[in-house]
Image: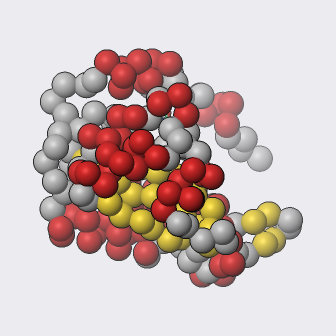
Amino acid sequence: MDAKELIFERHSVRSFSSDPIPKEALADILEAGRLAPSAQNKQPWRYLVFTESDKIQKLALNCGLIGLSNFFIRKAPCLIIACADTKANLKLNGQDYYLVDTAISFHQMMLMARSYGIESCWLAAFSEKKLRSYLDIPTSWRIVALAPFGYPAEKKSTYSKMVSSFAGSDSRKPLSDIVQFR
Ligand SMILES: Cc1cc2nc3c(=O)[nH]c(=O)nc-3n(C[C@H](O)[C@H](O)[C@H](O)COP(=O)(O)O)c2cc1C
């Protein structure tokens, strides 16, 4: 898969087959996150990786998914929680860069996953408070995102279709709205 296909054909996937992710693929996915650029090379990202179905199912019940809307994660063969250590932060112009750094790193992991045919979906609708207490996550870490990773199911679930149409997932603003050539 070339870079164009990797990026232009990417979309959030919310229905997964139960096939596990091969070890080599998972190793490359994590390496892609590790090698990401970060402000002053602070590398604030910290990842919690789950590959056991019973743990993932329990997590889905205990992460305070908003309105249970993200309950589909229980069926994914792999779930990764992206955290950021606020102690490894660079502050510039009043901006904290740990979130930017972690987002870059996590997205690199998602794109690496695609090169193996493994898809994912970025999730922010969870309760940081519940998840922190359930997993005993240090108070100096922010929980930035969760993402299920897996091979797409042959048939999309009704939920997946509903969210995609609700979120207007296929539409993008035109370049003229977002780019200014100066
Ligand atoms: C920061 C962030 C948070 C998101 N949170 C959720 C979420 O909680 N649940 C969900 O189903 N999708 C979530 N998404 C996926 C978006 O809905 C999706 O990226 C957007 O609609 C564009 O669709 P696409 O990814 O298929 O191109 C999130 C995406 C981002 C970047």
Image height of 42 relative to 46, above or below: below
- Which image quadrant is residue 73 in? top left
Please indicate, yes or no, whether residue 99 appears anywhere in the rendered image: yes
Image side of residue 145 versus residue 114, left or right: right
- Which image quadrant is residue 180 in? top right
Q: Where is residue 61 in the image (x, y as percent from the top left)?
A: 42, 42
Q: Position of residue 97 (x, y in %)?
A: 70, 67
Colouring scheme applied when the structure was drawn? secondary structure
In the foreground, 152 or 57: 57
In the foreground, 19 or 154: 19
Image side of residue 62 versus residue 74, left or right: right
Image side of residue 68 versus residue 73, left or right: right
Please indicate, yes or no, whether residue 112 appears anywhere in the rendered image: no
Q: Where is residue 14 in the image (x, y as percent from the top left)?
A: 34, 34
Image side of residue 27 versus residue 102, left or right: left
Q: Image point 32% across, 41% down: which residue?
A: 74
Q: Image point 31% across, 18% down: which residue?
A: 158
Q: Where is residue 72 in the image (x, y as percent from the top left)?
A: 35, 34
In the foreground, 80 or 112: 80
Q: Image point 73% across, 75% down: which residue?
A: 90
Q: Image point 55% across, 67% down: which residue?
A: 137
Residue that sits furthest to the bottom in the current view: 41
Number of numbered labels in the structure image: 0
